[in-house]
Amino acid sequence: MHYRILGRTGVKVTPLCLGTMNFGARSDEAQACAILDAYTSLGGNFIDTANVYNDGRSEEIIGRWMKQTSKRDEIVLSTKVHGRRSPHINDAGNHRWHIVREVEKSLKRLNTERIDVYHIHRPDADTPIDQTLRALDDLVRQGKVLYLASSVFAGWQLAEAHYVAQSLGTARFDIEQPQLNIIDRRIESEILPFCRKYEVATITWAPLARGRLAGVYTRGGRKIPKGSWYDAQKKTDFPASQWPVMEAVDRLADARGVSSSQFAIAWCLQVPGVTCPIIGPRTVEQLQDNMAALKFTLSAEELKSVDELNPPGNLCRDPQLGAVPR
């Protein structure tokens, strides 16, 4: 296994991070543990979860698995805070009141004394960033959190947080978690250049655009299959503007002799500034397919074909129908 350095932290992580949003819902505990076993057996060491994933069940499953397998110190563990955790008016957001409560709950669910990477899951317009950073810095000084991260921050928000941390002398965000896939390349305009300049690692999510680039919606015909994420969301079809992109990725993958999901993930791995795409397999078979993307690289011609399909920095559009919804 080849490892990548997580920004300026010096920590080495697997090029594909294991996302666990399905754990405790679409993947029951037995399936989730089988995925964790398979991922680590393949050399994987980077696991991402969140306190809101299935009302904490994802964290609980990971915590029990780490305790049963004694693999805690082999894992770089990432979780998040921000989302609403109860009807209580203050039980959400990025203010000190919420962060201090939630870090303790995550530590308990995860059966651990530390969180390696702690993400602010979303920006919070109601809380000044200096309050958020001071609260997080206290957790770093206490040893409960090792490295700080943001998620889905705009370019100006990353710049503000960087400047405020520098001014206050607090720990800073060393990692950002944005969306990136062949359909949505907007972070290439500002986010990735900022992260390269200031040595911020990027853990990009949705490399398959929630399955749209996995081939499952096109190879079997123009329909949404049972059991898919979109089926769970009660979707019956995609806007017409999405199908040509999905089908083009299928053709590129066929020409290469790999699955559509492997092609889409391999592309993400080669975008300048990307540290680790996050994969979110529901089964061991999906995990094995996704991890096989590490076995090859796309050629210059293949990368050019993707750029012609959707250029850098762009949200894929159909001239007649407008932007593809996220």
Image (cartoon, rainbow, N blue to C red):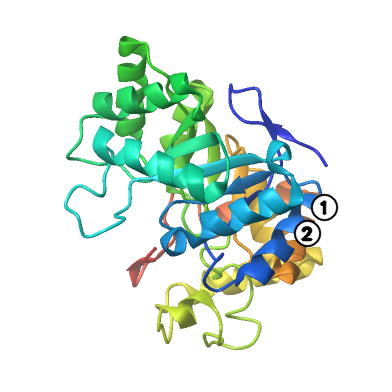
Whether the residues at callouts 1 and 2 have beta carbons within 8 Å, the answer is yes
**What is the x, y in percent for residue 113?**
55, 35
- The three-letter amino acid code for the residue at tag 1 is Ser
Q: Residue 99 sits in which quadrant?
A: top left
Q: In the figure, is residue 4 to the left or right of 88?
A: right
Quadrant of image for the N terminus: top right
- At horizontal 70% and vertical 36% (from top left) the residue drawn is 73
Q: How far apart, in angstroms, are the residues tagged by discs 1 and 2? A: 5 Å
Residue 315 visible in rendering = yes
- The residue closer to the viewer here, 222 or 175, is 175
Mark 1 surroundings: few (<14), some (14-19) or many (≥20) residues within 10 A: few
Quadrant of image for the C terminus: bottom left
**What is the x, y in percent for residue 321?**
34, 72
- The residue closer to the viewer here, 250 or 80, is 80
* Secondary structure found at label 2: helix
Label 2: which residue?
Answer: 38
Is 133 placed above or below 250 here? above
- At horizontal 33% and vertical 46% (from top left) the residue drawn is 82
**What is the x, y in percent for residue 191?**
43, 36
**What is the x, y in percent for residue 118?**
47, 37
- The three-letter amino acid code for the residue at tag 2 is Ala
- The residue closer to the viewer here, 66 or 216, is 66
Q: In the figure, is residue 186 to the left or right of 207?
A: left
Residue 152 visible in rendering = no
Q: Residue 182 sits in which quadrant?
A: bottom right
Q: In the figure, is residue 35 to the left or right of 191?
A: right
Mark 2 surroundings: few (<14), some (14-19) or many (≥20) residues within 10 A: some
Label 1: which residue?
Answer: 41
Q: Return the mark for residue 164.
A: none
